[in-house]
Image: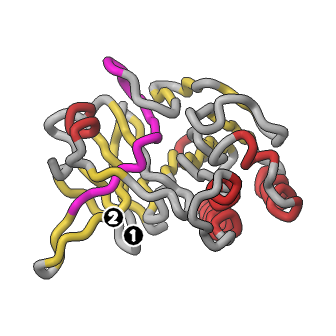
Amino acid sequence: MNGYDFTFAGERLTALGTGALWWGARRLLCVSDLHLGKSERIARRGGTPLPPYEVADTLDRFAADLERTAPETVICLGDSFDDTEAARALPEPARLRIATLQAGLRWIWIEGNHDPSPVAMGGSHLAELTLGPLLFRHIAQPGAQGEISGHYHPKAALRLRGRSLSRPAFLVDTARIVLPAYGTYTGGLRSDAPVLAQLMRPEALAIVTGATPHAVPMPR
């Protein structure tokens, strides 16, 4: 499996190169910030049109991770849809694709700030979820322990052959994990942004996604 193994809150987890998090002991796959329907929402609000391929691309990558890991439980960690109207406007083939992916799985939608109300999709809709020592919610909260969240779409700023670039990254310290955005067109926030630099503890690592995920001290 293309991933970086690490221990958090006493549990062995794997940060996959795609931006998904795998908890092998629970057969649980977690993704954050799919933002399905972003191109529809931008067009609806009169923004610069984007090619309307992001839903299919995101679901293709998600399907590949589901096939690779064969989970029993899936957690979508909030902002799964770009807004409530975008969820309602999903074309029927996309809705059927999601239903197919959900078949036979315990599927949990965590509420995000973009999609705060339950949508007409199968699965459970929760504000947050505690499983063993881990707490799954959309936005990190002060003082949390064992927390897994998303929301910020973190990226790590790196230098490669004299060039500056940024890649989606997991941010990990002893109290929390912040997942990168999984969806196409989601963009990101560099880890040296004040909100992330203040949120994460001094020992925080950035696990950089890609073909060979690897950990570096979180760029600040």
- The residue that appears at 75% across and 43% down in the rendered structure is 85
**10 Å neighbourhood of mark 2: few (<14), some, or many (≥20)?**
some
* Left or right of 87, for residue 153: left
- The residue that appears at 71% across and 29% down in the rendered structure is 117
Instruction: Give the percent coordinates (x, y) of residue 135.
Output: 49, 27
Q: Nearer the viewer, residue 46 or 215?
A: 46
Instruction: Give the percent coordinates (x, y) of residue 122.
Output: 83, 41
Q: Secondary structure at mark 2?
A: strand
Q: Secondary structure at mark 1?
A: loop
Instruction: Give the percent coordinates (x, y) of residue 32.
Output: 53, 46
Residue 167 is marked as 2
Mark in the foreground, 2 or 1:
2
- Quadrant of residue 83 in the image? top right
Q: Nearer the viewer, residue 191 or 147?
A: 191
Q: Which residues are magenta?
A: 142-157
- Quadrant of residue 167 in the image? bottom left
Q: Nearer the viewer, residue 171 or 85?
A: 85
Q: Are marks 2 and 1 in contact (CB under 8 Å)?
A: yes
Residue 43 is marked as none
What residue is pinned by disc 1? Answer: 210
- The residue that appears at 24% across and 44% down in the rendered structure is 193
Q: Is residue 157 visible?
A: yes
